[in-house]
Amino acid sequence: MKVYLDNSATTAVDSRVLKEMLPYFDRIYGNPSSLHAFGREALKAVDEARKTIADCLNAKPSEIYITSGGTESDNWALKGAVRASKNKVKHIITSKIEHPAILETCRELEKDGVRVTYVGVDKDGRVSVEEIKNAVTDDTVLISIMFANNEMGAIQPIAEIGAFAREEGILFHTDAVQAIDSQEIDVDKLNLDMLSLSAHKFHGPKGIGLLYVRSGVKIDRLIAGGHQERAKRGGTTDTPLIVGMAKAMEISKAERAENNLRIARLRDRLIDRALAEIPYCYLNGGREHRLPNNANLSFGFIEGESILFTLDLEGIAVSSGSACSSGSLEPSHVILALGTPVELAHSSIRFSLGRETTEEEIDYTVEVLKKTVERLRAISPLFNMEKGTGSYV
Ligand code: PLP
Protein backbone atom coordinates (compact mmCIF):
# COMPACT_ATOMS: atom_id res chain seq x y z
CA MET A 1 0.00 0.00 0.00
CA LYS A 2 1.27 3.51 -0.81
CA VAL A 3 0.21 6.16 1.71
CA TYR A 4 1.06 9.84 1.25
CA LEU A 5 0.93 11.66 4.57
CA ASP A 6 3.21 14.57 3.65
CA ASN A 7 0.68 17.07 2.28
CA SER A 8 2.27 19.90 4.27
CA ALA A 9 5.41 19.41 2.18
CA THR A 10 3.45 19.53 -1.05
CA THR A 11 0.18 18.33 -2.56
CA ALA A 12 -0.74 16.64 -5.84
CA VAL A 13 -2.00 18.98 -8.54
CA ASP A 14 -5.79 18.51 -8.79
CA SER A 15 -6.72 17.01 -12.19
CA ARG A 16 -9.21 19.87 -12.72
CA VAL A 17 -6.38 22.36 -12.16
CA LEU A 18 -4.08 20.58 -14.60
CA LYS A 19 -6.82 20.52 -17.25
CA GLU A 20 -7.34 24.27 -16.85
CA MET A 21 -3.60 24.96 -17.20
CA LEU A 22 -2.79 22.81 -20.24
CA PRO A 23 -4.02 25.11 -23.08
CA TYR A 24 -1.76 27.89 -21.81
CA PHE A 25 1.40 25.89 -22.44
CA ASP A 26 1.06 25.29 -26.17
CA ARG A 27 -2.05 26.98 -27.56
CA ILE A 28 -2.46 30.28 -25.73
CA TYR A 29 1.23 30.87 -25.18
CA GLY A 30 1.60 34.56 -25.94
CA ASN A 31 3.41 36.82 -23.51
CA PRO A 32 0.70 38.68 -21.54
CA SER A 33 2.80 41.85 -21.85
CA SER A 34 2.72 41.72 -25.67
CA LEU A 35 0.32 44.03 -27.44
CA HIS A 36 -0.78 41.63 -30.22
CA ALA A 37 -3.70 39.19 -30.16
CA PHE A 38 -1.58 36.31 -28.79
CA GLY A 39 -0.53 38.45 -25.86
CA ARG A 40 -4.00 39.89 -25.31
CA GLU A 41 -5.55 36.44 -25.10
CA ALA A 42 -3.04 35.38 -22.44
CA LEU A 43 -3.51 38.66 -20.56
CA LYS A 44 -7.26 38.08 -20.45
CA ALA A 45 -6.66 34.72 -18.74
CA VAL A 46 -4.23 36.30 -16.26
CA ASP A 47 -6.67 39.11 -15.46
CA GLU A 48 -9.50 36.66 -14.88
CA ALA A 49 -7.29 34.48 -12.68
CA ARG A 50 -6.20 37.50 -10.63
CA LYS A 51 -9.85 38.45 -10.14
CA THR A 52 -10.74 34.91 -9.00
CA ILE A 53 -7.85 34.94 -6.51
CA ALA A 54 -8.79 38.39 -5.21
CA ASP A 55 -12.43 37.34 -4.77
CA CYS A 56 -11.40 34.27 -2.76
CA LEU A 57 -9.49 36.53 -0.33
CA ASN A 58 -11.94 39.45 -0.35
CA ALA A 59 -9.18 41.60 -1.86
CA LYS A 60 -8.91 43.75 -4.97
CA PRO A 61 -7.15 42.35 -8.07
CA SER A 62 -4.71 45.29 -7.91
CA GLU A 63 -3.62 44.12 -4.44
CA ILE A 64 -2.48 40.67 -5.67
CA TYR A 65 1.19 40.38 -6.70
CA ILE A 66 2.26 37.11 -8.30
CA THR A 67 5.54 35.63 -7.01
CA SER A 68 7.44 32.35 -7.34
CA GLY A 69 5.99 31.01 -4.06
CA GLY A 70 5.89 31.42 -0.29
CA THR A 71 9.61 31.97 0.14
CA GLU A 72 9.76 34.90 -2.24
CA SER A 73 6.57 36.39 -0.81
CA ASP A 74 7.94 36.21 2.75
CA ASN A 75 11.28 37.73 1.71
CA TRP A 76 9.50 40.51 -0.15
CA ALA A 77 7.07 41.35 2.65
CA LEU A 78 9.80 41.75 5.25
CA LYS A 79 12.57 43.29 3.16
CA GLY A 80 10.12 45.45 1.24
CA ALA A 81 8.51 46.87 4.37
CA VAL A 82 11.82 47.54 6.12
CA ARG A 83 13.36 49.23 3.08
CA ALA A 84 10.30 51.43 2.54
CA SER A 85 10.20 52.52 6.18
CA LYS A 86 11.48 55.98 7.05
CA ASN A 87 12.21 54.97 10.67
CA LYS A 88 15.81 55.51 11.75
CA VAL A 89 15.86 52.31 13.77
CA LYS A 90 13.74 49.53 12.30
CA HIS A 91 12.15 46.88 14.44
CA ILE A 92 10.22 43.75 13.44
CA ILE A 93 8.20 41.45 15.70
CA THR A 94 7.89 37.83 14.63
CA SER A 95 7.72 34.42 16.34
CA LYS A 96 10.22 31.69 17.14
CA ILE A 97 8.21 29.10 15.19
CA GLU A 98 8.15 30.78 11.77
CA HIS A 99 9.21 29.00 8.60
CA PRO A 100 12.86 29.54 7.56
CA ALA A 101 11.55 31.82 4.77
CA ILE A 102 10.79 34.32 7.55
CA LEU A 103 13.50 33.43 10.09
CA GLU A 104 16.38 33.47 7.60
CA THR A 105 15.11 36.74 6.14
CA CYS A 106 15.13 38.19 9.65
CA ARG A 107 18.72 36.99 10.17
CA GLU A 108 19.75 38.80 6.99
CA LEU A 109 17.93 41.95 8.08
CA GLU A 110 19.62 41.77 11.50
CA LYS A 111 22.98 41.88 9.72
CA ASP A 112 21.81 45.17 8.18
CA GLY A 113 21.05 46.58 11.63
CA VAL A 114 17.32 45.78 11.87
CA ARG A 115 16.15 44.78 15.37
CA VAL A 116 14.01 41.67 15.54
CA THR A 117 11.97 40.38 18.49
CA TYR A 118 11.08 36.68 18.35
CA VAL A 119 8.08 35.95 20.59
CA GLY A 120 7.70 32.48 22.05
CA VAL A 121 4.72 30.11 22.10
CA ASP A 122 2.88 28.18 24.82
CA LYS A 123 2.81 24.38 25.02
CA ASP A 124 -0.01 24.33 22.48
CA GLY A 125 2.18 26.22 20.02
CA ARG A 126 0.33 29.54 20.13
CA VAL A 127 1.80 33.02 20.47
CA SER A 128 0.50 35.36 23.17
CA VAL A 129 -1.09 38.57 21.90
CA GLU A 130 -0.01 40.20 25.19
CA GLU A 131 3.63 39.36 24.50
CA ILE A 132 3.35 40.89 21.05
CA LYS A 133 1.76 44.04 22.51
CA ASN A 134 4.56 44.32 25.08
CA ALA A 135 7.23 43.94 22.41
CA VAL A 136 6.08 46.99 20.43
CA THR A 137 8.35 50.05 20.48
CA ASP A 138 8.25 53.39 18.66
CA ASP A 139 10.49 51.81 16.03
CA THR A 140 8.27 48.82 15.21
CA VAL A 141 7.71 48.73 11.44
CA LEU A 142 6.09 45.35 11.05
CA ILE A 143 4.54 42.40 12.88
CA SER A 144 4.81 39.11 10.98
CA ILE A 145 3.12 36.06 12.51
CA MET A 146 2.35 32.88 10.58
CA PHE A 147 -1.32 31.90 10.27
CA ALA A 148 -0.68 28.22 10.96
CA ASN A 149 2.51 26.38 11.73
CA ASN A 150 3.90 24.00 9.13
CA GLU A 151 5.27 21.45 11.63
CA MET A 152 2.67 21.08 14.36
CA GLY A 153 -0.31 22.88 12.83
CA ALA A 154 -1.03 25.45 15.56
CA ILE A 155 -3.39 28.15 14.29
CA GLN A 156 -2.51 31.62 15.61
CA PRO A 157 -4.89 34.39 16.81
CA ILE A 158 -4.45 36.31 13.55
CA ALA A 159 -7.61 38.44 13.70
CA GLU A 160 -6.72 39.64 17.20
CA ILE A 161 -3.13 40.50 16.28
CA GLY A 162 -4.40 42.22 13.13
CA ALA A 163 -6.85 44.37 15.10
CA PHE A 164 -4.08 45.41 17.49
CA ALA A 165 -1.60 46.21 14.69
CA ARG A 166 -4.23 48.29 12.90
CA GLU A 167 -4.94 50.29 16.09
CA GLU A 168 -1.23 50.96 16.56
CA GLY A 169 -0.63 51.82 12.90
CA ILE A 170 1.91 49.01 12.53
CA LEU A 171 2.01 46.88 9.36
CA PHE A 172 0.81 43.31 9.80
CA HIS A 173 1.91 40.42 7.60
CA THR A 174 0.94 36.76 7.87
CA ASP A 175 2.49 33.75 6.19
CA ALA A 176 -0.66 31.76 5.45
CA VAL A 177 1.04 29.16 3.25
CA GLN A 178 -0.11 26.26 5.45
CA ALA A 179 -3.48 27.73 6.35
CA ILE A 180 -5.14 28.62 3.07
CA ASP A 181 -6.38 25.15 2.15
CA SER A 182 -8.42 24.75 5.35
CA GLN A 183 -8.99 28.24 6.80
CA GLU A 184 -11.16 31.07 5.51
CA ILE A 185 -9.00 34.08 4.70
CA ASP A 186 -10.69 37.45 4.42
CA VAL A 187 -8.07 40.19 4.38
CA ASP A 188 -10.52 42.74 5.83
CA LYS A 189 -11.91 40.60 8.63
CA LEU A 190 -8.37 39.68 9.65
CA ASN A 191 -6.99 43.24 9.28
CA LEU A 192 -4.15 42.04 7.09
CA ASP A 193 -1.78 44.40 5.33
CA MET A 194 0.20 41.61 3.67
CA LEU A 195 -0.31 37.90 3.14
CA SER A 196 1.94 35.19 1.64
CA LEU A 197 0.57 32.15 -0.19
CA SER A 198 2.01 29.30 -2.26
CA ALA A 199 -0.08 27.32 -4.77
CA HIS A 200 1.49 23.88 -4.33
CA LYS A 201 0.15 23.61 -0.77
CA PHE A 202 -3.44 23.67 -2.02
CA HIS A 203 -3.29 21.31 -5.00
CA GLY A 204 -2.00 23.93 -7.41
CA PRO A 205 1.31 23.92 -9.29
CA LYS A 206 4.75 24.43 -7.73
CA GLY A 207 6.78 27.58 -8.36
CA ILE A 208 3.97 30.08 -8.01
CA GLY A 209 2.52 32.04 -5.12
CA LEU A 210 1.44 35.52 -4.26
CA LEU A 211 1.89 38.42 -1.96
CA TYR A 212 -1.25 40.35 -1.10
CA VAL A 213 -0.42 44.00 -0.35
CA ARG A 214 -3.26 46.23 0.86
CA SER A 215 -3.64 49.33 -1.32
CA GLY A 216 -1.88 52.27 0.28
CA VAL A 217 0.76 50.08 1.94
CA LYS A 218 4.21 51.04 0.68
CA ILE A 219 6.83 48.35 0.22
CA ASP A 220 9.99 48.45 -1.91
CA ARG A 221 10.24 45.90 -4.67
CA LEU A 222 12.44 42.82 -4.29
CA ILE A 223 12.90 41.71 -7.92
CA ALA A 224 14.00 44.49 -10.25
CA GLY A 225 13.21 44.03 -13.92
CA GLY A 226 10.41 44.68 -16.38
CA HIS A 227 7.11 46.35 -15.70
CA GLN A 228 5.20 43.21 -14.79
CA GLU A 229 3.03 43.19 -11.65
CA ARG A 230 2.52 46.94 -11.86
CA ALA A 231 6.32 47.44 -12.00
CA LYS A 232 6.70 45.85 -8.57
CA ARG A 233 8.01 42.43 -9.60
CA GLY A 234 9.89 41.89 -12.84
CA GLY A 235 9.83 38.65 -14.85
CA THR A 236 7.69 37.25 -17.67
CA THR A 237 4.17 36.53 -16.45
CA ASP A 238 3.61 32.77 -16.18
CA THR A 239 0.10 32.32 -17.56
CA PRO A 240 -0.39 28.55 -16.99
CA LEU A 241 0.81 28.69 -13.39
CA ILE A 242 -1.35 31.72 -12.56
CA VAL A 243 -4.41 30.11 -14.15
CA GLY A 244 -3.64 26.94 -12.18
CA MET A 245 -3.26 28.80 -8.88
CA ALA A 246 -6.61 30.54 -9.37
CA LYS A 247 -8.42 27.29 -10.21
CA ALA A 248 -6.84 25.54 -7.22
CA MET A 249 -7.89 28.35 -4.89
CA GLU A 250 -11.44 28.33 -6.22
CA ILE A 251 -11.75 24.55 -5.70
CA SER A 252 -10.15 24.73 -2.26
CA LYS A 253 -12.60 27.38 -1.11
CA ALA A 254 -15.68 25.63 -2.55
CA GLU A 255 -14.81 22.24 -1.04
CA ARG A 256 -13.16 23.44 2.16
CA ALA A 257 -15.91 22.78 4.69
CA GLU A 258 -16.53 19.24 3.52
CA ASN A 259 -12.81 18.39 3.26
CA ASN A 260 -12.08 19.82 6.71
CA LEU A 261 -14.71 17.66 8.40
CA ARG A 262 -13.56 14.44 6.79
CA ILE A 263 -9.84 15.10 7.17
CA ALA A 264 -10.13 16.22 10.82
CA ARG A 265 -12.01 13.01 11.66
CA LEU A 266 -9.19 10.93 10.14
CA ARG A 267 -6.55 13.04 11.91
CA ASP A 268 -8.33 12.46 15.23
CA ARG A 269 -8.47 8.74 14.54
CA LEU A 270 -4.72 8.72 13.92
CA ILE A 271 -3.93 10.75 17.05
CA ASP A 272 -6.33 8.85 19.33
CA ARG A 273 -5.18 5.43 18.19
CA ALA A 274 -1.47 6.33 18.37
CA LEU A 275 -1.77 7.81 21.87
CA ALA A 276 -3.83 4.85 23.12
CA GLU A 277 -1.95 2.03 21.46
CA ILE A 278 1.69 3.12 21.46
CA PRO A 279 3.47 3.58 24.81
CA TYR A 280 5.51 6.77 25.33
CA CYS A 281 3.79 8.47 22.39
CA TYR A 282 3.05 12.21 22.76
CA LEU A 283 1.20 14.78 20.69
CA ASN A 284 3.16 17.95 19.89
CA GLY A 285 0.96 21.05 19.98
CA GLY A 286 -2.59 21.41 21.29
CA ARG A 287 -5.71 19.83 19.89
CA GLU A 288 -8.06 22.80 19.81
CA HIS A 289 -6.42 25.35 17.49
CA ARG A 290 -4.91 22.85 15.10
CA LEU A 291 -4.96 22.43 11.33
CA PRO A 292 -7.42 19.65 10.44
CA ASN A 293 -4.76 17.72 8.55
CA ASN A 294 -1.87 17.85 11.04
CA ALA A 295 -0.78 15.24 13.55
CA ASN A 296 2.71 15.67 15.00
CA LEU A 297 3.75 12.90 17.35
CA SER A 298 6.89 12.10 19.33
CA PHE A 299 7.91 8.54 20.18
CA GLY A 300 10.15 8.31 23.24
CA PHE A 301 13.54 6.58 23.01
CA ILE A 302 13.86 6.51 19.21
CA GLU A 303 15.02 8.85 16.45
CA GLY A 304 12.45 10.37 14.10
CA GLU A 305 14.66 9.54 11.12
CA SER A 306 14.65 5.82 11.94
CA ILE A 307 10.85 5.87 12.05
CA LEU A 308 10.64 7.87 8.80
CA PHE A 309 12.91 5.48 6.88
CA THR A 310 11.17 2.38 8.23
CA LEU A 311 7.74 3.75 7.32
CA ASP A 312 9.11 4.65 3.89
CA LEU A 313 10.06 1.00 3.33
CA GLU A 314 6.42 0.14 4.06
CA GLY A 315 5.16 2.70 1.50
CA ILE A 316 4.21 5.42 4.01
CA ALA A 317 5.49 8.97 3.40
CA VAL A 318 5.82 11.25 6.46
CA SER A 319 8.31 13.88 7.53
CA SER A 320 10.53 14.19 10.59
CA GLY A 321 11.13 17.21 12.78
CA SER A 322 14.88 17.07 12.60
CA ALA A 323 16.75 18.65 9.77
CA CYS A 324 20.07 17.27 8.71
CA SER A 325 22.45 20.19 8.60
CA SER A 326 26.21 19.85 8.18
CA GLY A 327 26.13 16.19 9.11
CA SER A 328 24.46 16.64 12.50
CA LEU A 329 20.77 16.21 13.22
CA GLU A 330 19.31 19.39 14.66
CA PRO A 331 16.03 18.95 16.50
CA SER A 332 13.24 21.11 15.14
CA HIS A 333 13.21 24.72 16.41
CA VAL A 334 9.40 24.53 16.41
CA ILE A 335 9.08 21.42 18.57
CA LEU A 336 11.73 22.77 20.96
CA ALA A 337 9.81 26.07 21.24
CA LEU A 338 6.87 24.09 22.71
CA GLY A 339 9.09 23.21 25.68
CA THR A 340 9.51 19.61 24.46
CA PRO A 341 12.66 17.93 25.84
CA VAL A 342 15.45 17.62 23.23
CA GLU A 343 15.23 13.80 23.11
CA LEU A 344 11.54 13.90 22.35
CA ALA A 345 12.00 16.69 19.81
CA HIS A 346 14.43 14.34 18.02
CA SER A 347 11.72 11.70 17.79
CA SER A 348 8.96 13.87 16.30
CA ILE A 349 7.14 12.83 13.14
CA ARG A 350 4.70 14.97 11.15
CA PHE A 351 1.77 13.19 9.55
CA SER A 352 -0.02 15.60 7.21
CA LEU A 353 -3.22 14.23 5.74
CA GLY A 354 -4.83 15.28 2.49
CA ARG A 355 -7.97 15.17 0.40
CA GLU A 356 -7.18 11.64 -0.82
CA THR A 357 -6.41 10.16 2.61
CA THR A 358 -8.68 7.24 3.57
CA GLU A 359 -9.57 5.52 6.84
CA GLU A 360 -7.96 2.34 5.55
CA GLU A 361 -4.69 4.23 5.03
CA ILE A 362 -4.82 5.65 8.56
CA ASP A 363 -5.43 2.23 10.08
CA TYR A 364 -2.62 0.72 8.01
CA THR A 365 -0.31 3.54 9.16
CA VAL A 366 -1.12 2.95 12.83
CA GLU A 367 -0.50 -0.79 12.51
CA VAL A 368 2.85 -0.28 10.76
CA LEU A 369 3.77 2.44 13.27
CA LYS A 370 3.09 0.14 16.23
CA LYS A 371 5.34 -2.57 14.83
CA THR A 372 8.02 -0.08 13.79
CA VAL A 373 8.20 1.61 17.19
CA GLU A 374 8.30 -1.75 18.98
CA ARG A 375 11.11 -3.04 16.73
CA LEU A 376 13.18 0.13 17.02
CA ARG A 377 12.77 0.22 20.79
CA ALA A 378 13.92 -3.37 21.05
CA ILE A 379 17.32 -2.24 19.74
CA SER A 380 17.36 1.13 21.54
CA PRO A 381 19.86 1.16 24.45
CA LEU A 382 18.05 4.20 25.87
CA PHE A 383 14.75 2.35 25.97
CA ASN A 384 16.24 -0.78 27.48
CA MET A 385 17.85 1.30 30.25
CA GLU A 386 14.70 3.24 31.10
CA LYS A 387 12.01 0.67 30.28
CA GLY A 388 9.27 0.37 32.79
CA THR A 389 10.36 3.26 35.00
CA GLY A 390 8.15 5.80 33.26
CA SER A 391 10.72 8.40 34.28
CA TYR A 392 11.67 9.49 30.79
CA VAL A 393 9.41 12.52 30.62
N1 PLP B 1 5.95 29.30 4.72
C1 PLP B 1 5.48 28.16 5.22
C2 PLP B 1 4.70 28.17 6.49
C3 PLP B 1 5.71 26.95 4.56
O1 PLP B 1 5.25 25.81 5.07
C4 PLP B 1 6.45 26.97 3.35
C5 PLP B 1 6.77 25.71 2.65
O2 PLP B 1 6.88 24.65 3.23
C6 PLP B 1 6.92 28.20 2.86
C7 PLP B 1 6.64 29.33 3.57
C8 PLP B 1 7.70 28.29 1.60
O3 PLP B 1 6.89 28.11 0.48
P1 PLP B 1 7.53 27.75 -0.94
O4 PLP B 1 8.17 26.41 -0.80
O5 PLP B 1 6.40 27.73 -1.88
O6 PLP B 1 8.52 28.79 -1.27
Image (cartoon, rainbow, N blue to C red):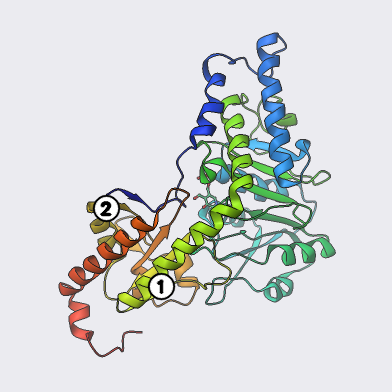
73 or 388, which is in the foreground? 388
Closer to us: 113 or 270: 270
Q: Residue at x 17, y 77 (%)?
A: 381
* Residue pointed to by mark 1: 272
Give the vertical position of 342 relative to 169 (above or below): below
Count neighbours of disc 1 (C-alpha within 10 A) and say few if under 14, some if 14 to 19, many if 20 or more.
Answer: few
Identify the residue under disc 2. Answer: 312
- The x and y percentages for residue 147 are 62, 59
Q: Nearer the viewer, mark 2 or mark 1?
A: 1
Q: How far from the left and from the top, in percent, is residue 319?
A: 37, 56
Q: How many marks?
A: 2
**Is residue 304 shown left or right of residue 335?**
left
Q: Earlier in the sequence, mark 2 or mark 1?
A: 1
Helix, strand or loop at label 2? It is: helix
x and y, in percent, of residue 96 in the image: 55, 66
| Residue type marked 2 | Asp
